Amino acid sequence: MNPIGWREFESAPQALPATLDALRELAVSLLSDNMARASGMLGLRPYHRPKPLVGTAVTVRTRAGDNLAIHRAFDFCRPGDVLVIDGAGDLTQALMGEIMASFAESLGVHGLVVDGAIRDVGALRQRDLPVYARGVTHRGPYKNGPGEINVPVTVGGMVVHPGDIIVGDEDGLLAIPPADVDAVIEGARRQHAKEVTALKSIAEGNFDRSWVAPQRDRMMNT
């Protein structure tokens, strides 16, 4: 990966409200299954009261333990955006806490995703604003830079581009490219219908497991 410099780009177009509404009704697991089960951010956990996260990514890449670029990125955030921060997974200094989360919420930001450390988690856990992070430390950040705004970043092992649609729930986080989102929603809706049918069959005592033994036999003979 190239060294971090000082770069700033305009925020990408936001997702349509109807698209966000549709995603809000679907579990991340259903969406993930319709992205080849190979996507998603790993190692980040929620630090808020359970609430779905859906919004358009504004991305930040910052030096480990330094949040100057994050403060600057607030100027690029619009209501409905999700601030996605690549802090290189570093846990030595917190990149933000209650004050910055409160300011983000006042701007209408729908959530914060931090591949790094946060603090003030006792207060954040009492709030509805979705905040995901890799870990926690009481040690505060530096404000020296450099940093980059609205560039491709890597968060939880997943590449996130500005304008990607971020979805999150208690199972985790996913970034969906706008070009793929309609197909992912359609597939997730079909899968949801199948799962509703499966749960109904379990309740009625006729859940079909006839495929298990043949599949086991195929795998043993592969």
Image (cartoon, rainbow, N blue to C red):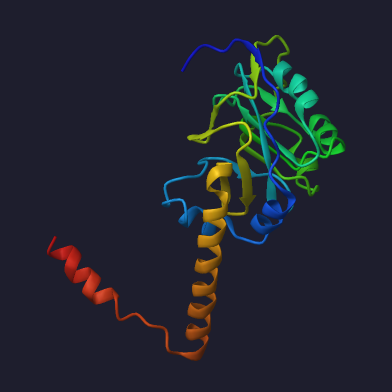
Q: Residue at x 54, y 73 (%)?
A: 193
Q: Residue furthest left?
A: 221
At 54% from the left edge and 24% from the top edge, which residue is drawn?
Answer: 88
- What is the total number of numbered labels drawn onto the structure image? 0
Viewer-proximal residue, 35 or 18? 18
| Residue 27: % across, % down | 59, 59
Residue 71 horizontal side relative to residue 209, left or right: right
- Residue 170, image quadrant: bottom right
Q: Which residue: 69% across, 51% down?
A: 20
| 41 sits left or right of 58 in the view | left
State the residue in front, 87 or 5: 5
Whether residue 145 sits left or right of residue 129 in the image: it is left
User: Eyeballing the image, is 60 above or below 135?
Assistant: above
Q: Position of residue 11 (x, y in %)?
A: 70, 28
Within the image, what quadrant is residue 132 found in? top right
Looking at this view, is 49 or 10 the one in front?
10
The x, y position of residue 109, in whole percent, is 78, 38
Residue in front for this viewpoint, 194 or 204: 194
Image quarter (top left, top right, bottom left or bottom right) of the C terminus: bottom left
The correct choice, above or below, for 160 with respect to 1 in the image is: below
**Is residue 180 in view?**
yes
Any part of residue 51 in sight: no
Residue at image coords 64%, 25%: 150
Q: Is residue 209 above or below residue 17?
A: below
Left or right: 52 in relation to 29: right
**Residue 167 in picture, x, y percent from top left:** 62, 48
In the image, is residue 3 above or below residue 19? above
